[in-house]
Image (cartoon, rainbow, N blue to C red):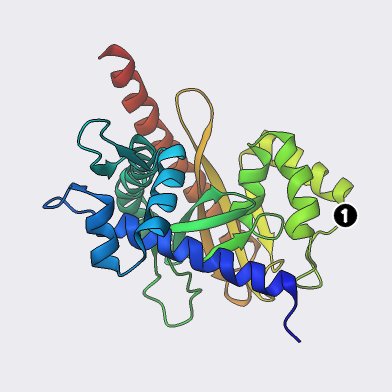
Amino acid sequence: MVTMADRQGSSSLKTVEKAMRILETFSHTRPELSVGELSKELDIHKSIVSRLVNSLCRGRLLEQDPVTRKVRVGVGAFRLGSIFASRQNVVQKLLPFLGTLTARIDQSAHAVVLDGALGLVVATVESPSALRVITRVGEHRFLHATAAGKLLLAFSPPALLEAIAVTPGLTKLTPTTITEMDALQKQLAEIRETRLSWNNGESHSGVGGVAAPVLDEGGNIVAAIAAVFPMNVAGEAEQQAFAKETLEISERISELFRSDGGKRGQS
């Protein structure tokens, strides 16, 4: 049986889809459009387009010329685009270092940034070895159950830990996943001290990882650099060697970000 809530949810989704279609109509060759032009092109009633344009203008994703009434992309969309561009700039800086790390340890490496209550893989370099761990760009990772995720938690405000404990929750993914808040807080304190975070099969059984932070000139975490490996091919000595190389690479990247920050401050 379809409930009133179901109908309202479906209606809201359709409204969002129409708003997205309006935003996607603008281009470099067509930077300004009237409500009538949008209505005709999208085959959506003019009154609906007008209402959606007003909402998008209030959110500053669009703006309307007070004289011509033409609509164009607003500063809010520019802000979102600048966030994306900034992330892409981070990826471009990280990738060569990930390649160096993989070449040194013969294991896969990736970079993770904070994306709400999850970690987002933004760059990855796979090991050439047949037996390797594969991580794909765009994957989201639990913060409490991965080396990179715990590192992001350790260098973020305590409110983030409190938030993820509620949503998505400290889910038990494997027998070794830490699900007790006290135990996790203790480990985060150790991570802040050593600048190293470990994953001992906590996200996927048999998959290990070690991560180190990339910090900017203000000591804020930009990303987590992680080396990941099949635990059955890496003994204690090998894992410590992975950690040493990962930490060294993360410090080199941090120096780059601190240098860039200093240049920005002088300009």
Which residue is at a point 57% across and 75% down the rendered structure image?
A: 233
Toward which corner of the image does residue 236 lie, by quadrant? bottom right
Residue 160 at x, y = what percent? 70, 42
Secondary structure category for the residue under label 1: loop
Q: Residues within 10 Å of mark 1 (few under 14, many from 20)?
A: few
The foreground one among 201 and 116 is 116
The residue that mark 1 highlights is: 180
Amino acid marked by disc 1: Glu
- Mark yes or no: residue 82 visible: yes
Residue 242 at x, y = what percent? 52, 56
Residue 17 at x, y = what percent? 44, 65
The image shows residue 145, relative to residue 262, as above or below, that is below
Q: From the viewer's perspective, is 191 left or right of 242?
A: right
- Mark yes or no: residue 123 visible: no
Q: From the viewer's perspective, is 171 left or right of 215?
A: right
The image shows residue 137, relative to residue 88, as above or below, that is below
Q: From the viewer's perspective, is 5 left or right of 180?
A: left
The foreground one among 129 and 94 is 94
Q: From the viewer's perspective, is 266 left or right of 30?
A: right
The foreground one among 205 and 86 is 86
Quarter of the image with the C terminus is top left
The foreground one among 89 and 210 is 89
Which residue is at a point 33% across and 15% down the rendered structure image?
A: 265
Residue lying furthest top in this view? 266
